[in-house]
Amino acid sequence: MPAIIQVKNISKSYTRDSFAIPVLNDIALDIEEGEFFCLMGPSGSGKTTLLNLIAGIDKPTSGNIFIKDTDITLLNESSLAKWRASNIGFVFQFYNLIPVLTAYENIELPLMLTHLSKAEKKEHVEAALNVVGLTDRMFHYPKQLSGGQEQRVAIARAIVTDPLILVADEPTGDLDKNSAAEILVLLDRLNKEFKKTILMVTHDPHAAEKASKIRHLDKGDLI
Amino acid sequence: MKIFKLIFKNAFRHKLRAFLTILGIAIAVIAFGVLRTVVTAWYVGVEATSANRLVTRQAVSFIFPLPFTYRDKIQQIPGVSQVTFATWFQGVYIDKNQFFARFACDAETMFDVYPEFLLSKKELETFKREQNSCVVGEDIAKQYKLKIGDVMPIEGDIYPGKWEFVIRGIYKPRDKTTDATQMMFHWNYVNERLKKETPERAGEVGWYIVKIKDPSQSGNISKQIDDLFKNSNAETKTESERAFAQSFLASTSAIITAMNILSFVIIGIILLVLGNTMIMSARERTREYAVMKTIGFSGSHLIGLIMGESLVISIIGGALGLTLTFPLIQGLEQVIPKGFFPVFEIEPITIVLAAAAALSIGILSSLSPIQRALKMKIVEGFRFVG
């Protein structure tokens, strides 16, 4: 399988009070298309930073990241926003749903950036809801859903545009055991059944078990 | 889902806060509308003036009279087409709270010089013929339920005694700015009585109104009139009717200016209130903006969302305020004595200014949150704890 993500000598450091704090040190990484890739590591190891860089929501200090054939480190903010809209689906630890929108509307949100017709949008949203098994909750607001259901809505929102890559940052970190298991089953299904390339960050070994490949980060180094 | 739905949902996320902000804007627009209406009502007299009329008054003060004999001399000046005159009579009608302008005038010429006072030919002829007759404005007739033939008793103060005038005409205003709250009667009638009771006050008029052929000659004609009476016992000051009306406002200009400033201060205050609301709303939604940026929403999308939300609140508040301003102004018009503000209406410019102010508030108050949302890096947005 060809590498869909190529991370080439990425370094990232933050500046605090004129001190440069290195977070990632010369990371090189290839992730193949269709892979369920898991990044593990303790808190502060830089795994979320690496995920953010690959997802195009942060910029590296040095190095390049190729997603398919696009070097996303060369894209400006506006191009990067468009690129993310069509290539990346995000799943966050705290779901980050819009509280004034129903499950249906939350899932529909990324489709507002597309030129799909109303009927096509409906078709996409219902398909996504069907995948996550929440068709009967489509008109519920986030506060009317359980944590696991909220995360499933968030996953539906992430997949509704049929992105190239699904990135998940601690997707089970805020869930109870059963809900976490359901989410992992869902991610696994998305990988196996829908052939989605998934990049997941977690420090939970149980969550990592579903991944086809696991790499560890420690103090900014890939080991 | 359309972007407007999201804007509306965001605008009313905190219903009480949105309601109070809308109410605040509505009250500000009402206050703005009322103050501006008062200010414009004050200037109605100036707006109603004519370019081809000059006013000649006593040079020392308006309260001093001029000799009636000046009329013929003024009439002789080239460029003058007609001269009329009037005297402020005042007096009390019913009680002291019933204020409206009461003049003794030259019945023969008054309505020629003031064509904006529309009086039927028959009524004008009767008025001219009967010495104890009077003409009242339509608004006064309505307010006091007066009709032709009614007698209006006036208790004189400047001209003491009991006076009675029979209504022989009710004039209509030609223009929106024409004062329909005046009462006019014969100067001759008053003068004849003065000759008998206080002869030293007879033969005097308050001011002359000089109709000229060419408004561009007003400065020249004014000078000629004043030169004519230079070094006399009653020197004159002649100016355009507009300048004359404005000189009346000069004494109250500080109040008018204060009201003008106040009307804009109110808008400024509400700008700060909405600005604060928008900043709070945007701050609370920092993570959501980060999520939206992550999903692919661009800077222009965020500008649309934040400004749209601010505009929804300001437009609803502005519309509510304007809607309520109309009945309020009508109510105030009933309460304020007719003669005090002859025309008390919301001017189209007031509506435009109020609407523009509401829109400006909406736009300006969103600028700071927009700037913050645009500057915010996505990863910082996710770290934000509100």
Image (tube, coloured by chain):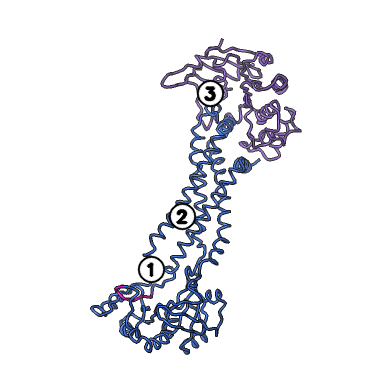
Chain A hue? Answer: purple
Task: Write down the quadrant of residue B257 in the picture.
Answer: bottom left
Q: Judge by depth and name the residue closer to the eye, A194 or B106.
A: B106
Front: mark 2 or 3: 2
Say which mark, if any, is on residue B263.
Answer: 2
Q: Which chain is blue?
A: B
Up the image or down, A209 lies above or below B142; here it is: above
Q: Is residue B280 left or right of residue B216?
A: right
Amino acid tagged 1: Phe
Question: Label 3 is found on which chain of the structure?
Answer: A
Which is nearer the eye, B280 or A86? B280
The numbered mark at residue A71 is: 3
Q: Is residue A53 above or below residue B91?
A: above
Q: Which disc is residue A2 wearing?
A: none
Residue B212, visible in the rendered structure: no
Dot 3 and dot 1 within a common chain:
no
Q: Where's residue B45, x and y in %?
A: 43, 69
Tell me the quarter of the image containing the C terminus of chain B: top right
Magenta: predominant secondary structure element? strand
Q: Per the image, is A159 magenta?
A: no
Residue at the spot of label 1? B248
| Amino acid marked by disc 3 | Asp
Left/right placement of residue B192 relative to residue B224 reads right
Q: Residue shown at 54%/63% (left/top)? A: B332
Residue range of the region highlighted in magenta in the rendering:
B52-60
- Percent position of residue B321, x then y: 56, 54
